[in-house]
Amino acid sequence: MVVLALVAFVSVGLAQQTKPAPAPAPAPAPAPAAPEKPAPPAPVKLEKFNGVIAKVDEAAKSVVVTAKKVEKTFLTNEQTKITKGKETLSLADLKPGMNVSIEYKKEGDQLIASTIKVAVPKAAPKK
């Protein structure tokens, strides 16, 4: 019985000494988010087309190129680079029948030429 009274007395004493856990501190308010920067535009994917010049229209700044049974019209602008080997050419230098390789981008339903590379004829083998 003494043991039971002692256990009860100690339990009450411990219960009085135990302090309730302090309330957790309120979480700090999240810092205001920095204004989101607009995502940089995705790099424009250039497509390629190889063929033969069918027509050059200097007034419209366009080149019509055919390959097999496909014909495409490419527009040129100030950024279009036209080369033949290491030589830089102008739109006026392009002639029907020239073999070209064109890198272009689509803008709506228009094909904008980024680069036009005129094929350099291979040198005849030396005898």
Image (tube, rainbow, N blue to C red):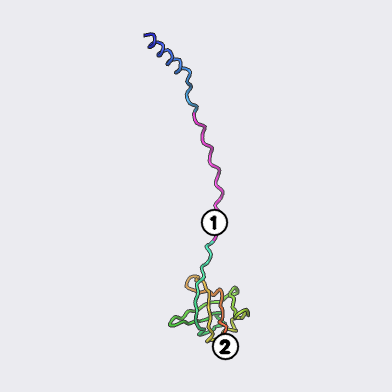
Residue lying at the far top in this picture: please name it. Answer: 2
Q: Which residue is mark 1?
A: 38
Disc 1, SS:
loop
Query: Where does the N terminus fall, quadrant-wise?
Result: top left
Q: Disc count in the image?
A: 2
The magenta stretch is 23-40
Instruction: Write the residue at 40% across / 14% down.
Output: 7
Using the image, determine if residue 84 lies above or below residue 20.
below
Residue depicted at 52% across the width and 73% down the height: 104
In the rendered image, the quadrant that contains the C terminus is: bottom right
Farthest left residue in view: 1
Q: What amino acid type should be assigned to the residue bearing mark 1?
A: Pro
Which residue does the image show at 56% across and 86% down from the upper left?
A: 95
**Whole-percent x and y of residue 68?**
44, 82
Quarter residue 114 falls in: bottom right
- In depth, the one of 2 and 92 nearer the eye is 2
**Picture coordinates of residue 65, whole percent (x, y):** 50, 81
In the picture shown, does residue 50 fall above or below 127?
above
Q: Is 28 one of the magenta-colored residues?
A: yes
The spot of residue 44 in percent (x, y) is 52, 67
Residue 125 disc label:
2
Q: Amino acid at mark 2?
A: Pro
Of marks 2 and 1, which one's residue comes earlier in the chain?
1
In front here: 76 or 85?
85
Tag 2–tag 1 contact (CB < 8 Å) = no
Left or right: 7 in relation to 102? left
Q: Is residue 117 left or right of residue 66?
A: right
